[in-house]
Image: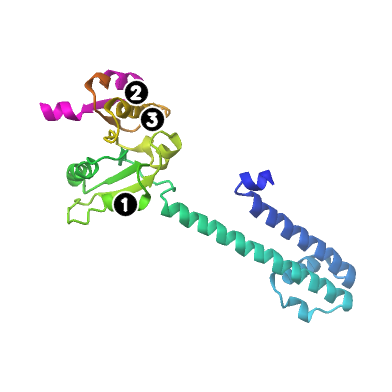
Amino acid sequence: EQWWAASPRAIPLTLLATSCTAVLCGSWAFQAATDCRWEEAIFTSWLFVADPAAHASVEGGTAATMVGWVMTCLGLVIFGFIVSVTQDMMSSKVESLRFGNSRIIEHHHTVVLGYSEALRPLISQLALANESEGGGTVVVLSDKMSMEELMRVVEFQDGVDLRGTETVVRHGSPLQAESLLKVCAPTAKSVVILADLDISADESDAKVMRTVVALSAFPKLAGHIVAEVRDVDNVENVRLVARHPIECVVANDTIGR
């Protein structure tokens, strides 16, 4: 039971083993009832399981007919379970796609971690920078809002021209390496970490530091990191925990200059 609950392959493997066992047992019973060759018994047993009407034309007497009827009943049960498991797997996959849990296949893209009011202007500027390359891909990873809300933020339905740049959103925590792999952070040309404006400056910078530590779990990054820091006193702390090239930007300080 624990194996069934923990392993996604448990139920399909169980159904496969049950089907093979049923076909083998049915072939032995059919061979004993008709004295046919074992290869023919195997094929006939499979027909009983796969085709509910196969036992109607069986020859060999009452015993062979009863074997065919039992195998047909087992086949209906087995294929009913197969249809149910397939439906559950497809539903789970569609649900995963809807909630942004699937892994993207990208390289040389830009990853934006977190969400703030600066997200839309940032995407616009990245689109302008990518114009000379014919466009690019910007992947946003955040857990502050649902997948649907995040998609509405980056859709730019107000007529903004992204100049060939595509936006992709994924739901997940930037503090988890698994979520960072979901957006292919190690193969990105740049990783931008946005500050959280809904909390205090120190808490936001601490969150940025934890994100930098999570990125340090990867031995190599194809690009560099740009981190938004709200307190200039925390810049050296962020640089200290970084394993890869990083550029810290203090938005308030930059605007003040």
Q: Which residue is mark 1?
A: 151
Q: Position of residue 98 (x, y in %)?
A: 42, 54
Circle 2 sits in a helix, a strand or a loop, which is it?
Answer: loop
Q: Tag 1: residue type?
A: Met
Question: What's the CA distance linking mark 3 and mark 1?
Answer: 24 Å
Q: Tag 3: residue type?
A: Leu
Question: What's the CA distance linking mark 2 and mark 1?
Answer: 30 Å
Q: Which mark is residue 215?
A: 3
Circle 3 sits in a helix, a strand or a loop, which is it?
Answer: helix
**Start and end of the magenta stretch?**
236-257
79, 20: nearer the viewer: 79
Q: Earlier in the sequence, mark 3 or mark 1?
A: 1
Q: Is residue 94 magenta?
A: no
Q: Position of residue 93 (x, y in %)?
A: 49, 55
Please say if 169 is above or below 15: above
Q: Is residue 36 left or right of residue 229?
A: right
> Can the viewer see residue 46?
no
Circles 2 and 3: CB distance less than 8 Å?
yes
Question: What's the CA distance linking mark 2 and mark 3?
Answer: 8 Å
Q: Nearer the viewer, mark 3 or mark 1?
A: 1
